[in-house]
Amino acid sequence: MRVWIIAGAALLVGIVGGWFWTVAELGLRPSGGERIQWGWPASPLTSPALALPGHEPKLVLENDEFNFGSIELGGKGRHAFVFKNVGRGPLVLTKGETSCVCTLSKIDHPNVAPGGSTIVEVEWHPKSRGPFRQSAQVLTNDPARQRLELTVYGNVVSSYLQAPETIVFSSIAPNRSETAESRVYSFDSDHLAVEDPQWSDKSLAKFFDLALTPLTADQLKEEEGAKSGVLVYVTVKPGLPAGAFAERIRFQLNTPGNPQLQLAIEGHIASQVELQGGPEWDAARGILMLDQVRSREGAKAVLYLMIRGDALKQADFRVAKVVPTTLKATVGKLQKLKADVGRVPLTIEIPPGTPSEDHLGTPIAPLARIFLDTGLPDNKQMQILVRYAIEE
């Protein structure tokens, strides 16, 4: 009798254990419900769980490499790899790592039934000239091909050249104008044209003049292989606020694809007032570098407006405008350091709780700006640039 009891208990344990093993492996799907997952979730960097014996998928991929050939700088290449499932079980695909942030993979249908197929799209955005080779990883539940590398390669070329891409004006005296140039060469077109110029800050565009003229035959000879080109003249007119300035002109070319170019314009208008600050103050560029700021913490920095000589009696600093208005600027009281030297503290603050914003100085996220009225006859207004991004 005791033997039968032991045997029955063993049978019961086996049935219960088998039930739990089946649920753990296959999941339990209640009537009308979603599959219940047991155990730890799979890591996104590991292959999907392999199928049960006899129900494996079988992946067929004709080619895991693609040659884009020549790609125009500023354009993009895109290729669709076709994944087929010729096995007996569903094929599961997930995105793995990529060799570069410029390589993106998109999986149309991550679950492929037996006999079905899907597309994995790889996109490449070239950032510099020359040959390239990049890869995107795809993870699968095919036991024979759990990890695949999709490779794209080619050569990035350019039918045009912009030189320089940034115009830098050194210290410009107040109420003076200065002119500098940039050139755009075309190696394909005999009639290059620069079209639709757009200023990044339209409120400051009135302080600049832009002139476009075709390059002469002698000027074209300075760049080997150039067929045509445009000379871009930029003039800084009197009236810009004292301090650093940073502008961008965006325009497009009349060549195939209408590539868009950008010309950065940087410089400094001399002032009777010198700005000083802590490690966040980049005096060479005239930018307060707050960089990444947590919304719940906010940020605060203090700059000092240094005044000397006769300007000490005339200066009367007031905040004229702040862009964006979520940034706060407060002018403190004059502090006498010597008989002819003084300083005025300027507190710049991002209050805690300020929503996410981006002012890192890109074309779509320009630097923040603080405009101060000075009370000085030669520098009636000055500008302070602030670089930051607020994250939640």
Image: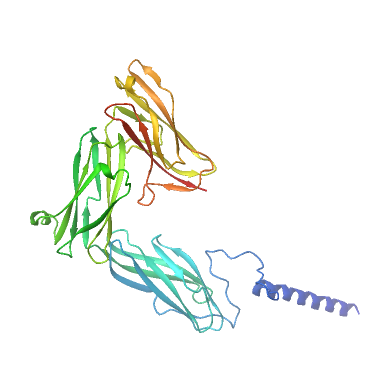
Q: Residue at x 43, y 23 (%)?
A: 333
Q: Residue at x 54, y 80 (%)?
A: 113
Residue 110: % across, % down: 51, 73
Residue 130: % across, % down: 27, 62
**Is any atom of residue 226 visible in this view?**
no
Q: Nearer the viewer, residue 206 or 217?
A: 206
Q: Is residue 70 left or right of residue 392?
A: left
Q: Is residue 82 above or below residue 185?
A: below
Q: Is residue 275 above or below residue 391?
A: above
Residue 159: % across, % down: 22, 63
**Is any atom of residue 23 visible in this view?**
yes
Quadrant of the rendered structure where residue 381 is? top left
Q: Farthest residue to the right: give it.
A: 1
Quadrant of the rendered structure where residue 278 is? top left
Count of numbered circles on the image: 0
Residue 13: % across, % down: 79, 74
Q: Is residue 53 left or right of residue 172?
A: right
Q: Nearer the viewer, residue 116 or 239?
A: 239
Q: Is residue 67 above or below residue 383?
A: below
Q: Nearer the viewer, residue 355 or 127?
A: 355
